[in-house]
Amino acid sequence: METLARRATQQFGAQALQPSQVTAPADEPFAGPDGLGGPRLVKGMFSVATSSSKPPTEIAEEVQRILAVNNVEFARDQFLFQCRYREQNLEVRFTIEICRIQALPLFGLHLKKISGEVWAYSGLCNHLTSQMKL
């Protein structure tokens, strides 16, 4: 089964910023407090700067606030943000996904570069995550 990140990358790379139609895979169910689907379950390591015990809807609001403050264009589809940052001749495209961390009552941010210069992406992500109040 295609992963959520792979599907988002294919859609994001092929189109301008458009909200995706991506949903969590059926084998990773999670019902949020409102009964709707929630973030997908992931294994792996997350840093303290990108993990939180807040509900995923609050994390999404914080991500959206920080992106807007920093003039990052984005399209949001529930827990996936497709982002584009442009400054002079520099363009960086990336995704931010809110994920549920396996075996812990925490949620984390999974950031992935789609295109652009590596150092610009790294600096931008560090800047954005340092401003977030997770």
Image (cartoon, rainbow, N blue to C red):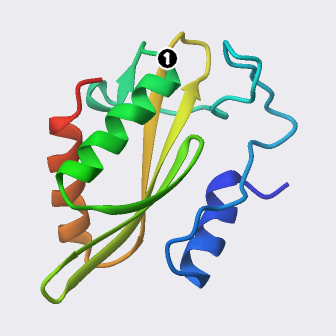
Residue 5 position, x and y percent, is 61, 56
Foreground pick, 66 / 48:
66
The residue located at (67%, 12%) in the rendering is: 33
Taking 39 as reference, is 125 left or right? left
Q: Amino acid at mark 1?
A: Pro
Q: Residues within 10 Å of mark 1 (few under 14, many from 20)?
A: few
Residue 109 position, x and y percent, is 43, 37
Disc 1 target residue: 55
Residue 119 position, x and y percent, is 18, 69
Quadrant including the N terminus: bottom right
User: Looking at the image, is 45 positioned above or below residue 111?
Assistant: above
The residue located at (59%, 62%) in the rendering is: 19
The residue located at (42%, 23%) in the rendering is: 58
User: Looking at the image, is 80 positioned above or below residue 51?
Assistant: below
User: Looking at the image, is 86 positioned above or below residue 43?
Assistant: below
Taking 86 as reference, is 30 left or right? right
Q: Quadrant of residue 112?
A: bottom left
Q: Quadrant of residue 47?
A: top left
User: Looking at the image, is 60 positioned above or below residue 58?
Assistant: below
Taking 130 as reference, is 53 left or right? right
The residue located at (69%, 64%) in the rendering is: 7
Quadrant including the C terminus: top left
Residue 131 position, x and y percent, is 16, 37
> What secondary structure is found at the residue carrying circle 1?
loop
Q: How many numbered marks, from 0 up? A: 1
Q: Quadrant of residue 121?
A: bottom left
